Amino acid sequence: MKLSGELLAGDQGFGISTEGCLVAAQAIKTLSDNGIEVGVVIGGGNIFRGVQLESMGVARSPADQMGMLATLMNGIALQQALHSIGVTAKVFSGLDCPRVAEPFVWSRVQESLRDGHPLIFVGGTGNPYFTTDTTAALRASEIEADVLLKATKVDGVYSQDPLKHPDAVRYEQITYSEVLAQKLAVMDATAIALCRGGNIPILVFSMSKLVDGEILGVLESNNSGTLVTEG
């Protein structure tokens, strides 16, 4: 599941809020309690966006590294929120920071999954120039996920931004190739290509389903978002 860092900001719009962390934690707990193995990639936009520093003349690599550090902070906050409701979660980082999070080692990740622990993947891929969407697709491929869930501000994939274009058309199902050909703003092209290569379906849904505690309904309903598949 790919979550935006903005979710953790809650109503305050920036930083980390108790309310936002608990919303995400409760959704993860619901999935885990129902026997679903969960891996989560969390963004860092509630704390920092690298593009902001680019306009100030900061090089892309250090700017992206700062963004990776923001995801570490979010991951620790989410882990502690899960701990507060009785769930033991493991944090694995693509960016080496051993005193804060475990390094991403495939065998250790697999072991934690078998033990039933929700996993939180932070630090991006550990490299600049890759988004957290790409990280989510990469981690989904590495753990052989059945589906990649992406929580967004809208309830699926649209032909245009529905917040700017009221006449935008919502798709119930669309192929990876159509997303790439139409340059739809679902996930970046690298993420889409990774999921297509691993044949991992992407389910795009509204993050309000997390707030409302309807995460199981997202998986069970045929009309809870947009499914991106091979066809």
Image (cartoon, rainbow, N blue to C red):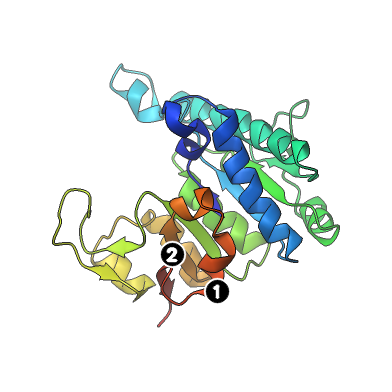
Q: x, y (%) of residue 117? A: 79, 52
Q: Is residue 132 left or right of residue 187?
A: right
Vertical placement of 199 versus 77: above or below?
below
N-term-proximal mark, 1 vs 2: 2
| Residues packed near mark 1 inside 10 Å, few (<14), some (14 to 19) or many (20 plus) | few
Callout 1: helix, strand or loop? helix
- Going by the picture, which residue comes out furthest to the front? 212
Foreground of the two, 134 or 22:
22
Q: Amino acid at mark 1?
A: Glu
Query: In terms of image quadrants, where is residue 114?
Result: bottom right
Q: Amino acid at mark 2?
A: Ala
Vertical placement of 174 versus 168: above or below?
below
Total numbered badges shown on the rendered structure: 2
Could you tell me which residue is drawn at 53 percent across and 35 percent down?
A: 8
Q: Which residue is mark 2?
A: 193
Q: x, y (%) of residue 123? A: 60, 37
Q: Which residue is mark 1?
A: 220
Which disc is residue 195 wearing?
none
Foreground of the two, 176 or 2:
2
Query: In terms of image quadrants, where is residue 30?
Result: bottom right
Does residue 127 appear anywhere in the picture?
yes
